[in-house]
Amino acid sequence: MENLSAAELIQLIRSVFPARDEDRRLAILADVPRAADADNEDWRRRRRIAGDWLVALAPRAADLGLEEVVLVAYPDVGSNNADLPEDGFRLPVHTPVPDAAAELDGVGDRVPFADIFAGTQLFLAPTEYSTTAPLKNAARQYGFRAATMPGFSPRMLPALRIDYTEVNRRVQLLKERLDRAQWADVHFLVDDRDEHRLFFDLRWRSAHASSGRFPDQGVAGNLPSGETYIVPYEGERDEEPSRTCGTLPVQIGAELVVFTIEENRAVAVTGEGETLRRERAHLLREPAYGNMAEVGFGILGDFGLEPIGEILLDEKLGFHIAFGRSDHFGGMVGPGDFSSPQAVIHLDQIYIPATQPRVLVTAIELGYEDESGEIILEDGEYLVF
């Protein structure tokens, strides 16, 4: 199985986490299936990767200026960006990550996550279910740094070898514009004939640049990286509803649905086949799923990277819009807005030909406080680099 060598891992960690005097411990996180029928080969491979990283790095902690590298496994949380369980299990080096959560008590030492967070300065999280939201929130509280890698696989290795200096330049250019923007107007063309338009209210929001480097304490984000994103205004101010509105086409598989958006929420959906039935049921069951949680501008497609079927990488390839949880990005919708921890979701829809061939983003215009406007993307291509 292709993997990063110890030397490549050390180089990557040095790049991602520039050294700080307070760094003492790096923890690798691995989630373990609660139910056997939830497991899959990619997940099993990912657990082996986490174990291999521990074996490679534990004896070379000093090369990173650290006292130790550890692996913490925990029962899976069932959905992307749900909160982590109360406890994790620290596994000895050379102990394989088990295939069932029920086995963790027998192979690892139980440790409260609060203690793990308090005593660890760096995290790598190559997990099945994304830990981005809970680690972002915990990083702010405990001051650690974390690179979240949900769905990581050897197919992502090319994305770890690109020029992240240029990546950083591009995401910062986008951040500067989004920080000033009061709105974004997105135009779509479906099947070369049907036009849709979605207006995003960006007042009172700041953008986030995800460049693959985490030099500052209290920060967590994805790796591979290469996007700038912003949470639309969600209407939390008294007597000031969100102005986000319009229609949003989404191709899922071969079928297409169109969401009607009012005050930053999907309130209705029309479309085709089984996808329509499923999306309607999801909105009825979990109204918070309909929250417009993120407007994202991925740039890695310009570096020749292709989608691999994993959101972690694929969302960084081009423009995307997320539904659901937003509190980890500075928004207002969090786990308490869903019916259960397992129902919490932050789901990206990615607008590139490989993932949504029936939908083209024909233009994105940003509007600024001085009433000027700027088209930053046209027919799927950025105009600002």
Image: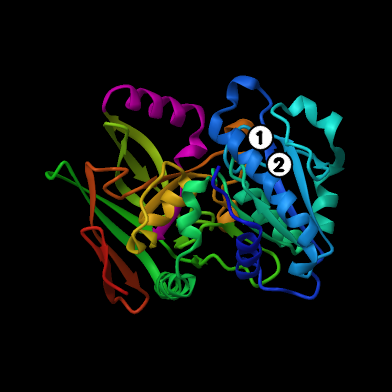
Q: Where's residue 164, x and y in %?
A: 48, 70
Is any atom of residue 243 visible in this view?
no
**Chief secondary structure of the magenta span?**
helix
Label 2: which secondary element: loop
Q: Earlier in the sequence, mark 1 or mark 2?
A: 1
State which quarter of the image contains the N terminus: top right
* Mark 2, residue position: 84
Label 1: which secondary element: loop
Residue 316 against residue 358 in the figure, above or below: below
Label 1 sits on what residue type? Answer: Val
For residue 16, side relative to residue 194 (left or right): right
Q: Where's residue 60, x and y in %?
A: 77, 62
Is any atom of residue 5 visible in this view?
yes
Give the image quarter of residue 357: top left
Q: Which residues are magenta?
A: 272-298
In this view, the residue in front, 264 or 153, is 153
Residue 254 numbered tag: none
For residue 157, side relative to residue 31 (left or right): left
Taking the spot 78% from the left edge, 42% from the top edge, the residue there is: 94
State which quarter of the image contains the C terminus: bottom left
Whether tag 1 and tag 2 are in contact, CB under 8 A, the answer is: yes
Q: Where's residue 378, x and y in %?
A: 22, 63
Residue 288 against residue 320 in the figure, above or below: above
Taking the spot 68% from the left edge, 46% from the top edge, the residue there is: 52
Q: Is residue 291 magenta?
A: yes
Residue extending furthest toward the bottom = 370
Label 2 sits on what residue type? Answer: Leu
Residue extending furthest toward the left = 193
The residues bearing labels 1 and 2 have C-alpha atoms spaced at a distance of 6 Å
* Mark 1, residue position: 77
Give the image quarter of residue 371: bottom left
